[in-house]
Image (spheres, helix red, strand yellow):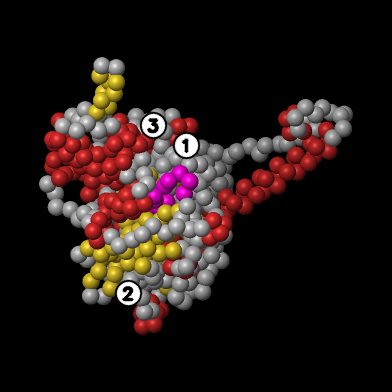
Amino acid sequence: MSAASSPFPSTVVTGGTIGSIVIGCKLQVLHGNPPEYRKAEILSIRPTPTPEDATRSEYYVHYSDYNKRLDEWVAPERLNLLGEIEYPKLKKPKTVLAGIGKETGKGSEPGTPGSTANGGRVAKNNRKSNLSKAATAGKAGDAASPAPGTPGTPGGAATPSVAGNKRKASAMDEAGGSSQEKEGQVPMIKVSGEDEDEDDDGQGGDDTPGQDENSTGEYSKEREIEKLRTSGSMTQDPHEVARVKNLNLIQIGKHEVETWYFSPYPVEYAHLPIIYICEFCLSYFPAVKQLSRHRTKCSLQHPPGNEIYRKDNISFFEIDGRKQKVYCRNLCLLSKLFLDHKALYYDVDPFLFYVMTVRDEDGAHLIGYFSKEKESSEQYNVACILTLPQYQRMGYGRLLIAFSYELSKVEKRLGSPEKPLSDLGLLSYRAFWSEAIVSLLLEQHKTGVELSIDDIANRTAFQPTDVLHTLQTLNALKYYHGQYVIVLSETVIKNAERAMKKTRREIDPRALVWKPIHFTATQLRFL
């Protein structure tokens, strides 16, 4: 049987035709500059007919052992059809027999009342469940988007296909970060202050249910680094709904930015080479002419909220998701392009958004933001945090994190980001925690004052668990004469001193004009 006549001629074959390529195939794909062949898996296929070829298609590929952010749509010319092609294995369909075994229900036997009826009912329910799963998988493969909003209109935010309040299933799980932490045991990874600016993008969590790190076991340093490098998210879910990136490029302000992940913008935008976003109201448009027409009518020159901080050219605005729904939904859509497991696109009422901007003669330009729940029983001070890619590695992520803890100090609470954090968010938080804790310890050491973990937590507004995990990460906890003591190595001290010499932007508490908002039970009832 030829490769072209059967979609699954064998597990691995040498050579094939473009017609034999199906979802799940693994083959060599041309990538990079200079271009070279890398093994990749076909995740999705979409038709892109041309006048010359009505059957032409594009292929969405994930490069094996490479970060998910490199996933992309490729033309058929980039597929190596002469080399080895690995086809997906056929799965045998499961046969469910009514009235037999476990499928009939617990404890029922043939001939007993309800055995055949229950078995038939179970089989029917299983068929419905399988059909439901197949429909969900089909939608994900096609990168389906929610029903579109009104394209080209201010605030034309798409209504996601799955609406509703998808919140975290658990309190302090999902290690790492900002979708926020379910971190049981932090692997021993040394954080160097000098690397903070390079890794710092302040990108944290999402608002999706995460996996408890305790349930997956502890990772070695090498394994975790490899996990961060190849995944792009701390939550390794192979069955995530949106695997296929639908937008490739956006223009926001003066910047053209390549997207990283799927975001539920209207399906009509999926095939466009670039979409245009107003940097002040975050409305999105398919053509630059529509954006230009919108800018003549859009009066916003800064985010639609209260300015609560201004120092030099940096400002922070506080925005209530209930009062500014359109802006906050557009902000969530934009951030989903760069956050892998953020699932909250639409229900913004329970959140406050703190948007950081840089000001010039044209207005206040969005740098990044973080959101927090209006009422968090777990004392989370960040629900989701992101620095836009064009402003990463400039220290802005560190500034966002510092501002979130400054608010916690005013509230007289200890704060922590929701877990799990994204890969970059985890690195940014660990670097920030390490630098702040080591600086405090060195400062107090000069005065001869000894600090406990609770003392450090109260002075920094960090949760004691975050302090403990950071000290473990730095390998600074030693058992001495029947108790644990904090001992900083020479390497940690040198790295901290080197980081202190850098010129960095810092949050000035005197420039913060803000009082915590207290919501009544009646107000919170409708969130």
Front residue of 375 and 233: 375
What amino acid is labelled 1 in the image?
Asp
Residue nearest the observer in this picture, 151 or 376: 376
Is the residue 249 above or below the residue 105 in the image? below
**Image quadrant in which you'd find residue 462:** top left
**x, y percent for residue 257:** 32, 62
CA separation in Å, label 3 and label 1: 11 Å
Secondary structure, mark 2, is loop
Give the alpha-carbon distance from disc 2 to disc 1, as whole Å. Answer: 42 Å
Q: Mark 2 = which residue?
A: 301
- Asked which secondary structure carries label 3, the reply is loop
Classify 10 Å Cα crowding around label 3: few (below 14), some (14-19), many (20 and above).
Answer: some
Q: Quadrant location of the N terminus?
A: top right
Q: Amino acid at mark 3?
A: Gln
Closer-to-camera residue (318/294): 318
Q: Which residue is depicted at the point 78% across and 30% down?
A: 100
Extreme-top residue of the structure: 481
- Of the numbered discs in the image, which one, if any, rests on residue 185? 3
Amino acid type for the residue under numbered disc 2: Gln
Q: Residue at x 22, y 66 (%)?
A: 313
**Horizontal placement of 476 versus 165: left or right?**
left
Q: Quadrant of residue 248?
A: bottom left
**In which quadrant is the C terminus drawn?**
bottom right
Residue 212 is marked as 1
Q: Earlier in the sequence, mark 2 or mark 1?
A: 1
Q: Magenta region: which residues?
A: 376-385
326 to 226, vertically: above or below? below
